[in-house]
Amino acid sequence: MTSGITVAALAVALASCSSTAAQSESTEYLVFYADGAQDAATAAIRRAGATPVSTDTKLGYVIAKGGDELADTLDADPSIAGVTTDREIGRKAGFAAFPDARALESGGGGEPLARRQWDMRMIGADQAAKTAPGTKEVLVGILDTGVDGKHPDIAPNFNAELSRNFVTDRPTDASGETLDGPCEHEGCKDPVDEDDDGHGTHVASTIGSPVNGLGVAGVAPGVQLVSLRTGQDSGYFFLKPSLDALTYAADIGVDVVNMSYYIDPWLFNCAHNKSDSKKQRQEQRAIVTGMQRAIDYARKRGVTIVSALGNGSTDLGKPKIDSSSPNLPKGKERTRHIDNSCLNVPAESDGVISVSAVGPSGRKAVYSDYGTEQTDLAAPGGDALDGKGESATRSILAAAPEAALRREGKIDKNGKPTTSEVVRQGGAYYQYLDGTSMASPHVAGVAAILVSRFGKPGKGGLQLDPATVERLLYATATKTACPAPRRYVYNVYGDKQTHLCEGGKSDNGFYGHGIVNALKAATVKP
């Protein structure tokens, strides 16, 4: 059984889960067992009156069907590491752009829209592509809402044969409210080259849009893009597709994956918070355990994992209050007192390169999370408020699916953009977006350049130890010191927000080891 796990966005609870006893008996759980305890855990599941359905030995969990009390019943069993329903675990970390006009357009040459790509100039990607564009022997996996593989600024680099869709559309959620809307394809299964949301297409474009004279170019315009869809049309992510996707990426030889989303229903996952029920603690343990096992599985097989840090304007190293969890079912949020033992996943999972966002001035974006233990690198993510007034062109421009824009009313029936957030070029569409979701693919693209330069022949083409990729990313990053004063004050529509930057120039809570640098990565010696 193939499995894998990702991160950017969260999904909806199992449709089969309901308040009636008959329905709750058919609730599907992922029961993670302790090391070497598969048989004991299976026996414990049966003793609890549940039915084991299948086992994933790669990541160490049993899929079981049982009632609402299963997690509580298994709570004290030493063979059990965590229990969760197959429900939404992540929400994409994108941040909507503000409509505006033509600020920050600069330069000439290159792709037709290159003058709008301040982000590529900031990290030297426009220059790096001349000598180190990446190679087709490198596979970059986009764990997201899908990728519009027919977009003319993605199609030349899109590998449809290896791409997979691990989700099935859900028209409504468990309460009957609209989730993904009507199914568009037989079996509610979208093709691997569709993206009804646009988030994944934007991420893929930043990583690897080709140099073809059409619109924009990505950080690594020569690599192959593999869509590993884990997000619903609505932008939510279920746990099981995420597990399947990351494991699949490892098994086929994907070199780098990008995860631009965070884990729900818990903003912070606390294994031992006394204010949570036994079932809730088991769910949080399962999320932490399952994600970590999938990450470990992938890294051991040569996958470098890059994640968005999050858009909560929060010091992740000093959390005190979580008032937004659990965010499902809706209306069940409550205030919890938490500490640093509670993890934001996958940003705080071991082995993940977590990325904060900066605006065009180089300051940490106001929305970006931060923390001395959490921030590994920084990259352009856009910040519409980074300057006088607000401007969409301080955001990140990348490819957008026409169908998604049309559905959102951002282009009219004649194909004309209705907002300056959207750009039409040569019959194709592009969109400005902000977020750490937009920052992390810059790092994924630079990682792909490094694998292209230093990788050795292996599964899928080339392979390079993720530890080596990480070391080179940090070594080539532009070291960026904390602002002076360290307590940086943001002006957000007249309100003041203060974020404290701690650490030295070589490693701090705002920028980590520095702002990623594609040009240095293209020229560094091993």
Image (cartoon, rainbow, N blue to C red):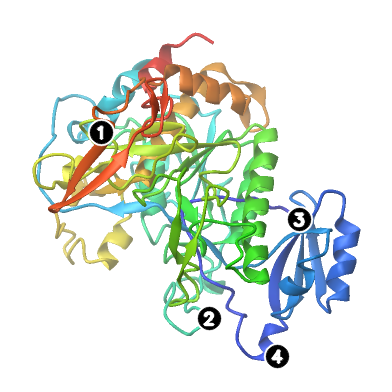
126 and 299: which is toward the camera: 299
Q: Separation of disc 3 and disc 2 at Cα?
A: 27 Å
- Find the distance from the CA under tag 3 to the CA under tag 4: 28 Å
**Which mark is first along the chain, 3 or 1?**
3
* Residue type for callout 4: Ala
The residue carrying pointer 1 sits among few (fewer than 14), some (14 to 19) or many (20 or more) residues within 10 Å by Cα, namely: some
Nearer the observer, 150 or 361: 361
Q: Quadrant of residue 517?
A: top left
Distance of mark 4 from mark 1, alpha carbons? 55 Å
Residue matched to label 3: 1
Up/down of 330 relative to 306, above or below: below
Query: Which mark, residue 174?
Result: 2
Using a 10 Å C-alpha cutoff, classify the residue at mark 4 as few (fewer than 14 neighbours), some (14 to 19) or many (20 or more).
few
Q: Which of the two discs, 2 and 4, labels the residue nearer the N terminus?
A: 4
The disc labelled 1 sits on which kind of residue? Arg
Residue 193 percent across, percent down from the top left: 46, 53
Q: Residue at x 38, y 60 (%)?
A: 197
Q: Name the residue carrying label 1.
A: 363
Q: Toward which corner of the image does residue 152 lie, by quadrant?
A: top left
Q: Label 3's element?
A: loop
Residue density around tag 2, few if under 14, some if 14–19, many if 20 or more, within 10 Å: some
User: Does 232 appear above or below 222?
Assistant: below
Classify residue 37 as left or right of residue 161.
Answer: right
Q: Is residue 455 left or right of residue 104?
A: right
* Residue at mark 4: 22
In percent of the image, x 29 and y 57: which residue is there? 402
